[in-house]
Amino acid sequence: MKKITRSWTQKRDQKLEKLESINSLLDGKFIDTSRIVEVMEALIEPGSKVVLEGDNQKQASFLSQKLVEVNPSKVHDLHMIMSSISRPEHLDIFERGIAERIDFSYCGSQSLRVAQMVEDGTLKLGEIHTYLELFGRLFVDLIPDVALVAADKADKDGNLYTGNNTEETPTIVEAAAFKDGIVIVQVNEIVDELPRVDIPASWVDVVVKADKPYVLEALFTRDPQNITELQILMGMMAIKGIYGKHQVQSLNHGIGFNTAAIELLLPTYGEQLGLKGKIAKHWTLNPHPTLIPAIECGWVESIHSFGGEVGMEKYIAARPDIFFVGKDGSMRSNRALSQVAGQFAVDMFIGSTLQIDREGNSSTVTAGRLSGFGGAPNMGHDPRGRRHSTAAWLDMIENPHELSKGKKLVVQMVETFGANKKPVFVEKLDAIKVRNEAGLAIAPVMIYGDDVTHVVTEEGIAYLYKAEGLDERKKALAAIAGVTPFGMESNEKEVKKLREKGIVAYPEDLGISRVQAKRSLLAAQSISDLVKWSDGLYEPTSKFRSWS
Amino acid sequence: MKIVFTFPGQGAQIPGMLQDVPHYVQKAERIIGASILDDEKAFQSTIWIQLALFLKGVAVAERLIEKNVCPQFVAGHSIGAFAAAVISGVLTFEDALKMVWHRAKRMDEAYPEGYGMGVICGLTEREVKKAVDLAYHVQFPVHLSNINAEQQIAVSGSWQGIEKAFQFAKQFGAQKTTILQVPIPSHSPLMAELSEELLDLISKVPLNDANIPYLANRTGRMLSDKNKISEDLALNVAFPVRWNDMTEVCVESGADCFIEMPPGHVLSNLVKQAHETTRQIVVDEVGLEATQYLIKKWKEQDE
């Protein structure tokens, strides 16, 4: 064995050298807004691994727009790492040759261009991840050379305040800062004193004041006006037949209207069932405005959030017993930690999807579009590394034995026909075709059938965890698949047997009459009702206001 | 605000539509050496339909630009692509007109009767493909054609083939099937020969890279490269127009306002349906003055 001779500080030396080269432009850690392109050209080495902060909501929009302006002969072939590809310029950098390769989680709003660019070879696809996997790889084999991130405020020393919209900024910065990556931050404003420090100055190399505040999307606001009676019926079935039946204490909700309906039914229908204080107490989710009535009625004990929601800031600040709020009064979100919580620490995940096959595998990918995963698969699976028990988790044990363990409840909630009037239940997922077209190693399945414990449709609930064998599982799904081709294969005799065994429940089996499902059951009928519930603390953006 | 100019294709024509653009008509007549017709009788032929749509598209777009209403993207449907290419600066009005004249004449000669186009609503691309494959017969060909919306897809070929495809489409649950006012099997392999001819023709024309990104009919890509754009202009006649993809790429690229050149509002309806949050202006309905006013107002609001 021979010891190798090398410098063990190569990366640090290189970083110092690079920072030295822009010394004349630096005032402490600060550079002038107009010099950012020059600075990026000096600091970003061709071929570098660059994390550009495009979160689900917050976008480092000044830095992404300026990255398009760098000279491609100086900065090229970058390997981008992005949790969300969400802005046009995130892809323009590939067309200009500035970037070459990408590893990402989600690209819903750019999914056609991504598919086209993969096909044309303009963009080389690394892997498509769930959020946690991508964050994990930042500390393993995708360690960033440069991190381009956004914060609300910096103080004179370069400490950062990220507040409500902290999201994944600390995670990204940590991966770069402690492995000699260069951290460049855009801030909305520079102040003498921060409300609180979210990221310490010693983790940060360059701070630039953006020409405009970062772009922030309101993604989690669902207007109660658009909730249908079918969704209310499904919500009632879920509350009684799943939340109540299994005593679900902790949970994550998806962002659809189905789960918004449930949030608004807890204070009314849930109360009638006497479930208050027994279910849905601890939440990992973004601050959904539709949760306000349940909070105000005393249903909710805690909420930890992935990110913020525009308009909810004052309401959250006034409810620190419920949300995670700093001394300064603003929420601290954290996508990585909330995803961990949603994966390991909750009883149930419930969400919607676009396609489900006969075995219960589901996907939101449709032909010609490559939308990625985001965080749903982290939460929408049974983590085999879980070792603590709760009543709901243990309730999933069907055949107890010496070593039996519980299961997370993974619930899919869909109408049998989607918004495009096509059956949600399909022979084959479009994901399989997309895998072939994009040359992916595996088909982009959002949630695998063997992780799904329940499926809810307007027809009823399939308790898949109770089904014995694949055949019974398929029959249970068919029994609630309505008049889709797949549903029409089920016959009365088999359905009767499944209902007797408790594997399928129709509304009448749950003691729910379809005519009960009225909009008047919702605790709020409109956005203005939500504002009233919040005593005026919730301030919806103009997009969601019918008044001015 | 990012603006897309959209240029309609065949089906949008209205008799008399060139009355308000006499200068363009005169200019065009000098170039092709023939009188240009736009009456009802003339519009039974694809020749006059195509010429009229091209002239009107260029004329109105140029007037809007004079009024400082400028597009960030251009997207033309079928013959509309030629007007879009002129506005994006890829080729001159004169060269484009010559191409259009040739294209239209040859399309008119190629299938004098027994061929045309239809549209199927309520089925996906995959379902229409299945209907078309089942209906296809060498003697009575039919092909999948323009994808106008996720579930509004044209078929192109012989009338018998189209009828048969309609029958299968209804079996698969189509909501509606309609015969189009297009007397030729456009945007199908039946036009392959012509597309090769056009490719040859356009290779002799001086071209520039687009100064306004152009949306390709055949691939749904956003292009600036002159060679790729000229290839699209030549070949699109033999391939489906991927209108749905074209507008989606615009929206993904930041477009939030679509202005449709006259005549009609077909394209605006399609865009509105697919992208609810975008703004639409139908020039045919509101006129040039109001278009200019709205754009000015919206720009101020955005700031």
Image: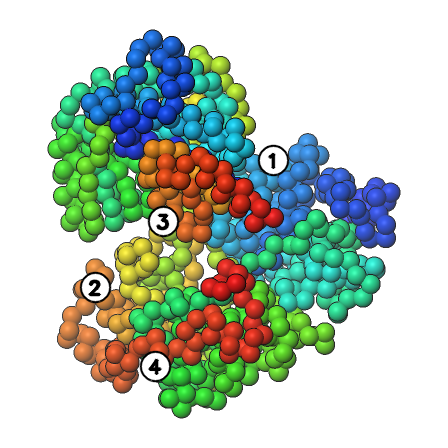
For label 2, count other residues whose C-alpha is less than 10 Å away and answer few (under 14), some (14-19) or many (20+).
Answer: some
**Which x, y percent locates residue A264?**
43, 77
Quarter of the picture containing the N terminus of chain B is top right
For the residues labelled 1 and 3, the Cα–Cα distance comes to 34 Å
Res A123 seen here: yes
**Which x, y percent locates residue A184?**
73, 51
For label 4, count other residues whose C-alpha is less than 10 Å away and answer few (under 14), some (14-19) or many (20+).
Answer: many
Amino acid type of the residue tagged 1 in the rendering? Gly
Where does label 1 land, which residue?
A97
Vertical position of residue A152 compared to residue A78: above or below: below
Q: Looking at the image, which residue sits at the far bottom?
A: A274
Where does label 4 land, which residue?
A241
Residue located at (15% from left, 49% from top): B171
Res A440 seen here: no
Q: SS of the residue at dot 4? A: helix
Where does label 3 land, which residue?
B273
Amino acid type of the residue tagged 4 in the rendering? Gly
Q: Nearer the viewer, mark 1 or mark 3?
A: 3
Amino acid type of the residue tagged 3 in the rendering? Gln
Q: Do the residues labelled 4 and 1 touch (CB within 8 Å)?
A: no
Where does label 2 land, which residue?
A483
